[in-house]
Image (cartoon, grey):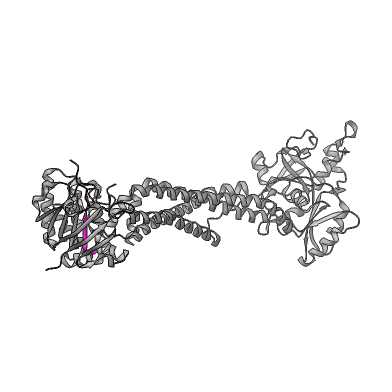
Amino acid sequence: MYLLRLALASLANRRFTAFLTAFAIALSVCLLLAVERVRTEARASFASTISGTDLIVGARSGSVNLLLYSVFRIGNATNNIRWDSFQHYAKDPRVKWAIPISLGDSHRGYRVMGTTTDYFSHYQYGRKQHLELSQGREFASDPFEVVLGAEVADALHYKLGDKLVLAHGVAAISLVKHDDKPFTVVGVLKRTGTPVDRTLHISLGGMEAIHIDWHNGVPARGAGRISAEQARTMDLQPAAITAFMLGLNNKIATFSLQREINEYRNEPLLAILPGVALQELWSLMGTAEQALFVVSLFVVLTGLIGMLTAILTSLNERRREMAILRSVGARPWHIAGLLVLEALALAVTGIAAGLGLLYAGIALAEGYVQANYGLYLPLALPSAHEWTLLAIILGAALLMGSVPAWRAYRQSLADGLSIHL
Amino acid sequence: MSQALIELQGLVFAWPGQAPLLDIPAFRLEAGEALFLKGPSGSGKTTLLGLLGGVNRPGQGRIQLLGQDLALLGQGARDRFRVDHTGYIFQQFNLLPFLSVRENVELPCRFSRSRAERAIQRHGSVDQAASELLAHLGLGDPALLARRADSLSIGQQQRVAAARALIGQPELVIADEPTSALDADTREAFIRLLFDECRAAGSSLLFVSHDQSLAPLFDRHLSLAELNRAAKPREA
């Protein structure tokens, strides 16, 4: 115990260097833990982008591709699927609910999704949470109503009753706009932290209406044009959609229905299990995540090497201190113990301060990160995994501390009591 | 013949690969004696003190402290033996600057149980021992005891070092040029204080210095050059 007191007093005597050393360790520990937390949370929130959906069905392509465009609004469908295919499965007795999705348009870089009100009642994300409206209502019978995702409303400052014009295609700047048929904002969804926030939701009828006078990918001209008023009176039943989501009555039927859909004779379809596809997709991104982890490990190593350097550099100017201790009876192993304790004190301080920084950072950034990245970072106690990491850091510090300890041991044996330096 | 405190016989010591630095056929320091050992720098003085402290081991010959042959003790036991029976005062910067004056004085009691026990036996507690020793050495101000050691003047620091060497009444106090950083007036006063305290503690004093002018103050004085057969003839 007295050795610890001596080690701390000696450190306090070099408080500036000691502070910087501990601070470097603190920063590196904070970074490592932050990366770990974000990594764990990102994986969890990624996996909870969609939940409660048993199958996603689209035109035959790759499962990651289907997942990307149907859930993440990234990329495009290679092909549409026929409305009657959707009807066929929507009416299947094993199916509890079915949500059709029609994609392909955008508004100022945000994707537009045509769907039905079933989307609002059945789509789930996270821990089986349903979508909720923060203002207004779901779109109703009028085809030109739009419900905005939270981020769309925030970023573009839309409020209820505002009119907006959709653009054809998904490019950020689209030259072709559906400006003859403006939509009215009737509702805004609460934030979910999922791609839903970045989506504009319209009815399938609305999607059909804006394309009703289009032929071969271009709008009709002159007399061929159909006004919004005319469109309202027409039959807006779509002939094709992009994909659909299914919720089943009994999960056991998932695999058999998936196989059936994949073997559907009337049209080439692909059914995927969202969880499996998410795993596949995450494994693609896993490399980047691993790299981040490795980088932060190296930062911790750098912090510890900084400590090693600081202690080793101090050894020479502390020969006198060691000799005095030897002359009052400290044995060489006392000297070595002193240096190990010093390293330990620096590492423990660094780790504690790193945890402090992490929690301060989380407390400050929690709301912002949740709102902007959909990452939920709780102010939770370190997990078992994090404790393990901290223990490993401490072990590494101890190992590093034994290097100067060994040198001081040798040095104090050689120097003896002589302090005529 | 009473037992000598230090007894050297046929001591020969050489650093590896060098000619012998020390060759001392015989040397005795009696209990309670204050001996002045004159040794210019480079005369092997530090090496001799290292041998007496059990830090270095002689190539030949025998070193006995209190009748104990140091060669028979292991490294750890020699270290323990040294702190139990010897107090050291060095030239200057003797103290750990980051500890208080009091903590510096009490250091030997932290590492030697027998020194701590003797301090408690005589003064009641280690704290009390430190206070009384410092008061005897003219450092009685309690506020001063709590100050950092490096905030004291050199003269005060050397007195703190003396108190540290004397705490727990070691049989032997080795002083290696303790006065070289002091001016002439304080030098003599310091040595007299040291004598008084050594006498009070019953400690022998081995005082090593190059400063011949201090020699008359001591019971006995010797020159290392005379003792040491390996000493080179001094150049004119």
Q: Nearer the viewer, residue A140 or A192?
A: A192
> Can you tell which quarter of the image residue A44 is in?
bottom right
> Can you tell which quarter of the image residue A274 is in?
bottom right
Q: Position of residue A412 (x, y in %)?
A: 33, 55
Q: Nearer the viewer, residue A420 or A32?
A: A420
> Is A93 rendered above or below residue A357?
below
* Magenta-tinted stretch: B83-97
Q: Nearer the viewer, residue A195 or A145?
A: A195
Q: Nearer the viewer, residue B121 or A130?
A: B121
Q: Residue at x 50, y 48 (%)?
A: A302
Does the magenta segment cover residue A30?
no
Can you see residue B6? yes
Q: How many marks?
A: 0
Of the 4 image quadrants, the one containing the C terminus of chain B is: top left
Residue most extreme to the top: A222
Q: Is residue A390 left or right of residue A114?
A: left
Q: Position of residue A59 (x, y in %)?
A: 83, 51
> Can you tell which quarter of the image residue B11 is in?
bottom left
> Is B33 rendered above or below residue B1?
above
Q: Position of residue B68 (x, y in %)?
A: 22, 67
Q: Residue at x 10, y 57 (%)?
A: B196
Q: Residue at x 34, y 52 (%)?
A: B17
Q: Position of residue A122 (x, y in %)?
A: 74, 57
